Image: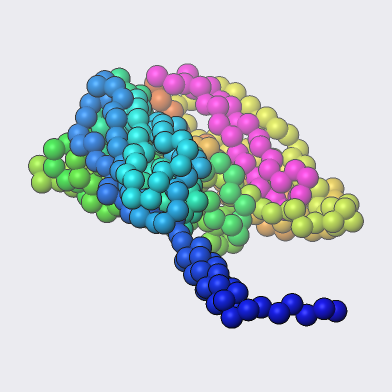
Amino acid sequence: MKLVQFTSHQSLALRKWLVAASLMAAVALNAEVKINWLNSVDDFGSIREEDGKVALSFRGVNAGDEPLVIIKAKSTCGCTTPSFPRGEIAPADTFEVAAEFDPAFQVGKIEKKIHITTNAEPKVHTLTLTGAVSPKASTLAARYPVKAGSIRLNKAAIDFGNVVRGKAKMEYIEIYNEGDSAVTPRWLHCPKHLAASGEPVRLEHADRGIMSLYAMAEDDDSYGVYADTIALAVDDSAQAAVVNIPVSVCFVEDFSFMTDVQIANAPIARASTDLISCGVVVPNAEGVSRSFKVENRGKSTLRIRRVYSSSPHIVVARHSNKVKTGKSTEIKFRISPSIYSPGHPLVDETITVVTNDPTTPILTVRVTAEYF
């Protein structure tokens, strides 16, 4: 290999070039794209829903050494439409991200987010728009149909549906404060199988809040349907209102873990009838007593979890909670004469039997009578 010899002049020129190249590389390594926001929050104040769309603006500066590129802008709500400059934004240049907010069906205090993706660090920036929207009367009534004092509720009752024993399920009521003063909503009491919470504790004018309920079977007797009424109190400086909210839940046993062999060897519950007609009854009589049987046709012991009636005037007597294979137990009940009402002489109620039969865990017997 032939070595190349440099003159002193050439060596000095080479050293200068290497120093310049190193400086350029260092500058390139230290170059960055950075955004300084002049405002990352825009408050449109208080508007009416019927006023229509509102324009908002967020301004920033490319505080870096390289061109800034906004890749995309995405809102967390379809009511907000962002727009942004396309192409490169030179260092030290200002730019604007615009947004249009549509207040239709947006009630109360508003806080929406816009996520901006860029080539800067950090790559994602969040912009916030805030304000308050006074709803149209039609929107308010449609979204919050239940009125109680200075508040409105989005529903008058809570139905949990089926809740698997051992698991919790949450339902809620949304509250809107249309009054001029702040209110403090609170649950007055809870049945043993319900737990309650609320957020926020205090609602200012046009605030929305959530009052939550959690259903969970906490003891061995919680099977089947429970119908309760829970009271929601709302206190403010002018008045106190109490709303009684019906709550229903059906606790069901979890059979999902059972294998095919276990199901084949499980108990099978059958009622001797699905209709008991008591005929014509005299209103001032002592009441009507009847019974039916529950038979176990399966291969293991049948356990009767709970027996209950759809009417408080039908009282079920004590009964055996265990039925061996091939045997049956008698379920006795009595219809109290207090069930009679002059305007409703017909009785049409049900008695429900909840068992550990994985195929048919609930048996329903219809009970009818007619008073004259």
Q: Residue at x 28, y 28 (%)?
A: 54
Q: Position of residue 27 (x, y in %)?
A: 47, 65
| Residue 278 in view of the camera | no
What colour scheme does the image use? rainbow
Q: Position of residue 320 (x, y in %)?
A: 68, 56
Residue 328 lies in the magenta stretch: no
Camera-side residue of 132 and 325: 132
Camera-side residue of 192 and 179: 179
Q: Residue at x 51, y 65 (%)?
A: 24
Q: Could you tell me what secondary structure mostly forms the magenta stretch?
A: strand
Residue 370 lies in the magenta stretch: yes
Image check: 167 left or right of 54? Answer: right
Camera-side residue of 258 and 340: 258
Image check: 202 left or right of 72? Answer: left
- Residue range (magenta): 343-372
Above or below, comparing residue 126 to residue 152 in the picture? below
Above or below, comparing residue 291 to residue 366 in the picture? below
Q: Residue at x 70, y 32 (%)?
A: 274
Q: Position of residue 167 (x, y in %)?
A: 59, 57
